[in-house]
Amino acid sequence: MASKFVTPTLTDQPTDGSLPILEGTLGPAAVDIQTLFARQGILAYDPGFRSTASCKSSITFVDGDNGVLLYRGYPIEELAQHSNFVEVAYLLMNGELPTPNQLRTFQNELLDFNLLHDQVMSFFRGFRRDAHPMAVMVGVVGALSAFYHDVIDLQNPADRHRAAIRLIAKMPMIAAASYTYSVGRPQRYPNNELDYSSNFLQMMFGRPNREHKVDPVLARAFDVILILHADHEQNASTSTVRMAASSGANPFACVAAGIASLWGPAHGGANEAVLKMLSEIGTVENIPKVIARAKDKSSSFRLMGFGHRVYKNFDPRSRVIQQQASQVLTHLGIDDPLLEIAMRLEEIATKDEYFVERKLYPNVDFYSGILLRAMGFPVNMFTAVFALARTAGWVSHWLELQSENHGIDRPRQLYVGSGKRSYPANK
């Protein structure tokens, strides 16, 4: 069959078969193709949905060409400098920064729901001690759907809000317990006198039989980590949550699906790969060899933590995380050779014409692993921290979808299999 081509044209006047252009507040416009199949008998083909707007959303905006990330219109750099994670979570969920009274009420709601049911704690003992924390989190968060299924009416805004609060409130204890269980240590309970990040750190690193004082510098650094990772538009895990939610699934099951998607090394595990690469480089003197390998077309080696599927400029989160890593290492008196290698590698690569032409700049993963390691996190907890932060974004998208008459997501396909055939009579 001869190839056929469609040449799109933009017109100011609607015609028979024309498709409308939808304008957003910021970013590129979108062609509304909802009637394409019904009117033209053809489907749009876009593997990976890289040129498809799957929904309308007012939560997060990413401008990859100019290195911009906005939460509800606020630049990520300003939020990281002036805000805290709980305030950012409120902003993502509700669209506006809270008043002092609203923030106080929101904080109290999180404190009211931050404990795990004692039966949920018993689930941890069903996993192997060496189970990956993300495997544990997928199972435990999914199990929560069995505890609250009878008190969630998705048509009731108050019930939806309570479900979102429960998820943000309980995730720190779930993440911390996934670690303490793996090292055979009893889990500490939340301390309602502490802020969100300090509370997680004391549950993660404290021991039940002694007082644990959280270093305020580390607590602030962790809060910034949570802010930077709280949301990032329609990425794989967020799209997974939204697709599951479109079926009317329990919110805990939807977020469990998001955690499973985030666990993939192409999504949430990049900072682990950066640490491994820096360790393999070993010394600053080896950097020129590594740069040469990265530029060698015959080599499969590539610089981890450089470039981004969305950002074709600097990742705006990378500068913030680099500053936090530097501050924490100085505060703790740690002379980490990996930080020196990372900073020198960035300096060389960002001046090299090869990387500049290809817009390969450091992303948030390039420094976040160094910072988390300095704070005492084992490598297998890096993605769990990511999930803890991203829960605020997931529940915000879940809430947004519930308020729409969205209908169930149902992508189509371009079928390339066998045509209709008969079952062989002599088989």
Image (cartoon, grey):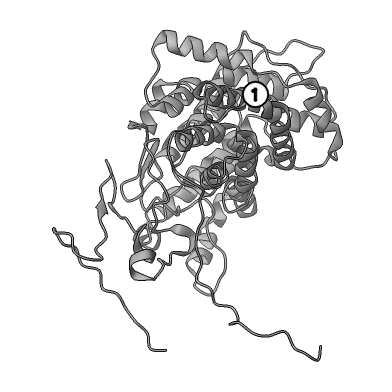
- Residue at 58%, 27% in the rendered image: 153
Relative to residue 192, is residue 46 drawn left or right?
left
Which of these two is toward me, 414 or 316?
Answer: 414
Where is the N terminus found, in terms of image quarters? bottom left
Relative to residue 19, is residue 402 drawn left or right?
right
Q: Is residue 336 visible?
A: no
Which of these two is toward me, 175 or 347?
Answer: 175
- Residue at 26%, 73% in the rendered image: 7
Where is the C terminus found, in terms of image quarters? bottom right
**Image quadrant of residue 199?**
top right
Q: Secondary structure at mark 1?
A: helix
Q: Position of residue 73 (x, y in %)?
A: 32, 32
The amino acid pointed to by label 1 is Val
**Image quadrant of residue 190?**
top right
- Residue at 39%, 38% in the rendered image: 60
Which residue carries the number 1 mark? 151
Residue density around tag 1, few if under 14, some if 14–19, many if 20 or more, within 10 Å: few
Which of these two is toward me, 405 or 113?
Answer: 405
Q: Position of residue 304 (x, y in %)?
A: 54, 54
